[in-house]
Amino acid sequence: MKKVLFIGGTGTISSACAELAISRGFDLTVLNRGNGPEPPSEVRRITADMNDEAAVAEIIKDMDFDVVADFILFKPEQAERDIRLFAGKTRQFIFISSASAYQKPLSYAVITESTPLYNPYWQYSRDKIAIEERFIKEYRDNGFPITIVRPSHTYGDKSIPVCQHGAKGSYQVVKRILDGKPIIVPGDGTTWWTLTHNSDFAKGFVGLMGNVHAIGEAFHITSGESLTWNTIHDIIGGVLGKRVITAHVSTDMLCKFEPSWEGGLTGDKCASVRFDNSKLKRIVPEYIATTRFDQGAARTLEFMLSHPECQVPDPEFDALCDRIIAAVDRFGAE
């Protein structure tokens, strides 16, 4: 039985990976601060803060793992910490990067793992690129057993994926649709996008765990379904039984109203993307994404609307949407 450590382990991606790993017989431990939901009973939990490197080093000093996966690694200095903590203590270290690291704008619409990594619009993506480069250098110089995984837009039961939402999540967009209010969609809404259910992502991820062919390699894990943002929102409206009223606004204008949106829009969601998962399927032959978005959206919205804790209002985002739409309407009238 392979011994696995998940750092984090309670998020949208990691919780689905943990559930599948347990079902496939992995001996799983999670390390986090203990603020999230309780893990399944089969999982051991270490309560610690990864920012306290000395304390973590003391806890794991007599432990060794077949796989360590860090789901909460976002800054280059955290990569240095993980190298110090886990060099010589694991046969595989999985870094969860991001498909947003791929070149923007794309020179070719179909993305493979050899697509250049370059995103001048989003610091989050540039940090992920820097971490990838640091781990690859450590692999080349010292044999650190890195595997890089790049998720794209992955969702689960608790939040429906939409093109743009506020700091408190996607529920406010759902509420606007239910209330018959227009929602904002960047551009003309015909940008192609790929959404992946977390249960499908987990199949690829767990297939890479302990897989000797994955060492020193990078993989993205996505579904093969591409939809336009107009279609994505129409599917959501169809599940809700509501016609979606769409306000198309240029990306440049949206970023003038809210500069913090530039990374997620110009640097990610407003670039048409399709992913070629051939490399993953060579290493994990059984991988296939089976959840269409209309199926996943129905499941997610049923969960959200039956769980009040998922219905977090965001009046600040709601007011911003109203201001943007009013400004666009005034411009159109003039």
Image: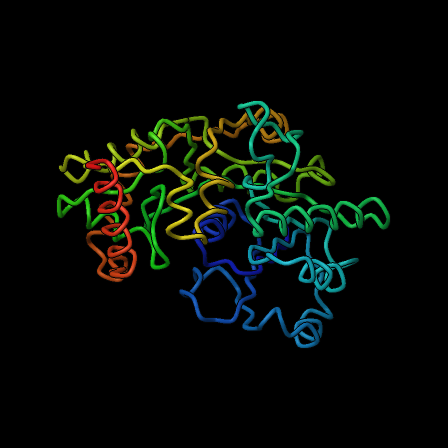
Question: What residue is at 57 percent from the left and 29 percent from the top?
Answer: 106
Question: What residue is at 25 percent from the left and 32 percent from the top?
Answer: 235
Where 289 sits versus 42, above or below? above
- 268 lies left or right of 249: right
Taking the view exactly as shown, the residue that stands out farthest to the right is 141
- 8 lies left or right of 188: right
Foreground: 109 or 151? 109
Where 91 sits versus 75, above or below? above
| Residue 219 image position (x, y, % from top left) | 62, 36
Could you tell me which quadrant the C terminus lies in?
A: top left
Where 45 sits versus 1, above or below? below
| Residue 234 image position (x, y, % from top left) | 24, 32
Where 278 sits versus 271, above or below? above
Q: Quadrant of residue 309?
A: bottom left
| Residue 326 image position (x, y, % from top left) | 22, 47
Q: Quadrant of residue 166?
A: bottom left
Taking the view exactly as shown, the residue that stands out farthest to the front is 334
Question: What residue is at 79 percent from the left and 58 percent from the top?
Answer: 88
Tally of numbered discs: 0
Scheme by which the image is coloured: rainbow
Foreground: 209 or 131? 131
Question: What residue is at 56 percent from the left and 52 percent from the top?
Answer: 124
| Residue 249 image position (x, y, % from top left) | 32, 38
Foreground: 147 or 19? 147
